[in-house]
Image: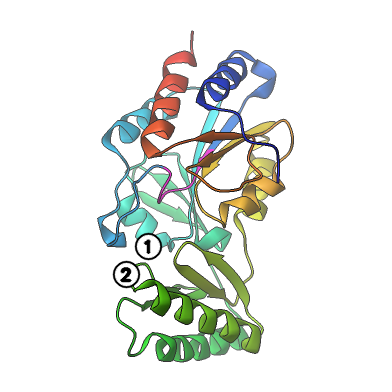
Amino acid sequence: MNAEPRDARALTDRLHALAADADAHPLLVALDFDGTLAPLQDDPSASRILPAGVDALATLAGHAGLELALVSGRSMADLQALAQVPAGTFLIGSHGAERARVTTFGLDRDVVELTHAQADRLAALGARAAAVARGRDGVWVETKPTAVVVHTRLAEPDVGAEAEAQALALGTELGCGTLHGKDVVELTVLPADKGTALQALRGELGAPVVLYAGDDVTDEHAFAALGATDVTVKVGAGQTAAAYRVGSPDAVVAVLADLAATWDR
């Protein structure tokens, strides 16, 4: 891990410099959703971007030399339903396995195709993961187009820990990709991670610099994949490879609003 990340003031100064540097454009502003733009909720369907964040993203979208993306572990269907983002925003779901761009007429989606073997493995994962959740209060299973997710946020700590351990063992047994985040284990048949997805998007856009903010263990893949000239931001407490730290989604939104106000000065 890096030394203790720099604070929000240092982050703001860095973004002011990038806004004024045409050689750093297009700047790719990529953001995790839950815990970064939207406060964490016990009920995931209740998550929403903070109202001030909706306004900041809409303002940023109007600036030349800047591209927006949300990068989430959520399925694309969930991300589309919950994220209030402007047209032109890229949506990266399922940790990079799904991708789309928001248009005024809906989503322009990349098609995800599984082989027969991957589809069979996904079905087997769903059945086995359901057995992990069965009889454990507060543990539930989500099925995505390329993965199965065991959620434990509502479970008692000992119950959640036991379910997560069994889910991790299941991933090892079936040879699946495994992502272990906050109160969640995702087992995927199509390996993907946020860092690989971000690097692919920046290459397509020709973005010299990426700003990425996230709060979870899975966001460390993105921090590690980005370079020294990129801007990596850990939201909240915990060890991190990120260069900067802010305390909460409210702080993230304040930084974005400041960037929006600064961009064309």
Q: Which kind of residue does numbered mark 1 sit on? A: Ala
- The answer, for residue 142, to whether it is visible in the render is no
Q: Position of residue 193 (x, y in %)?
A: 62, 59
Q: Position of residue 260 (x, y in %)?
A: 43, 21
The quarter of the picture where residue 56 lies is: top left
Question: Is label 1 in contact with label 2 (beta carbons under 8 Å)?
Answer: no
Residues in magenta, as a range: 30-36
Q: Residue at x 50, y 72 (%)?
A: 185
Q: Which kind of residue does numbered mark 2 sit on? A: Leu
Q: Position of residue 231 (x, y in %)?
A: 62, 33
Up the image or down, 197 lies above or below 173; here it is above
Magenta stretch, overall SS: loop
Residue 245: assigned label: none
Question: Where is mark 1, residue-wise?
Answer: 77
Up the image or down, 100 lies above or below 8; here it is below
Q: Residue at x 56, y 25 (%)?
A: 11
Q: Few, some or many C-alpha atoms within 10 Å of disc 2 (few <14, some 14-19, many ≥20)?
A: some
- The answer, for residue 118, to whether it is visible in the render is yes
Give the side of residue 20 with respect to residue 203, left or right.
left
Give the side of residue 13 with respect to residue 103, left or right.
right
Question: Where is mark 2, residue-wise?
Answer: 154
Which one is closest to the eye, mark 1 or mark 2?
A: 2
